[in-house]
Amino acid sequence: MVRPGKRAALSTRFAGTLLSVEVDPGDRVASGDLLARVDAREVNAAIAATRTKINATQAGVKQARLESQRLERLYAEDLIARVRMERAQVKYEEMKAQLTAAESELEAQQANLSYTRLTAPFTGRVTEMPVDTGSFVGPGQPLVIMESREQLRVDVPVSSQVASRLAPGEQLSVVVGPQGKTLPASLISVVPALGEEATGQRLRLSLETAGDTLAPGQVVSVLVPDRVQSAQTSEW
């Protein structure tokens, strides 16, 4: 079975309404293109609240620093007990830690915001839109499915004896259609079976798209060199 070289089912981390879908099945998109948007009001509200918290914490840090410096001067003049100066220093360090935590929270919320905008992870073609605009969607639910067909993949089940005679990078042949057109394919890897002598190992092949000759879903035959009978070729 011919498969696309790349395939991605894109989803969001959040539950919300699918606000818009920017593409249709069959559209070709480039890496980074906007595909769909999910309601981001909760994330935007969290970002706004965190920014307010950061502003308040920054003011607290400034005040704590000034108080710590003031008490350090008084302690140097032997006007206050050491414990008051140390408490002020501890308060200052606590406020700085709170500010660092708030800034980290803001970064996390801004990262979450990116998951409300689905963009193409690679250049390819949209093949399916399982959900319509206005639907309520949840985390992990596929919203856009896209493929890259610049390269295609073929997995071929073979015996371990055949697999052991082949090495990654080797050139094989794929036979397409009733006319028996032959296309070159490169062996990427051998996917091993559980047992060394078990049938069911797979050759994973890669081949370039040849116009309209091949498409995902087609069934092809693969010719594998028979090194036992070097003058012949066996079909698997």
Image (cartoon, rainbow, N blue to C red):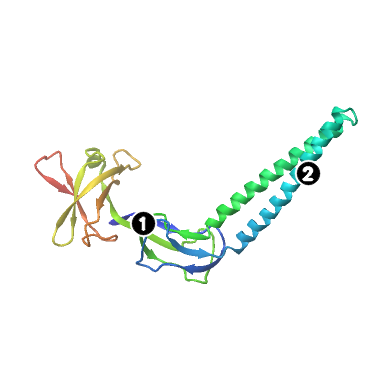
Mark 1 or mark 2: name the one nearer the start of the chain. Answer: 2
Residue 67 image offset from top left, x and y in percent: 81, 39
Left or right: residue 76 versus residue 223 is: right
Q: Which residue is mark 1?
A: 123
Give me the residue at 39% from left, 69% from top. Answer: 24
Q: Residue at x 35, y 41 (%)?
A: 194
Q: Tell me the residue at 43%/56% (across/down).
A: 32
Rendering coords of residue 161 (x, y %): 23, 40
Task: Please provide percent x and percent y for residue 108.
Answer: 59, 50
Q: In terms of image quadrants, where is residue 52?
A: bottom right
Kind of residue at disc 1 = Thr
User: From what the image shows, is residue 152 above or below residue 225?
Assistant: below
The residue singled out by tag 2 in the image is 63
Q: Tell me: residue 136, above or below residue 108.
A: below
Query: What x and y, as percent, mark residue 39?
Result: 56, 65
Q: In this orientation, which residue lies closer to the viewer: 185 or 26?
A: 26
**Helix, strand or loop status at disc 2:** helix
The disc label shown at residue 75, or none: none
Q: Are marks 1 and 2 in contact (CB under 8 Å)?
A: no
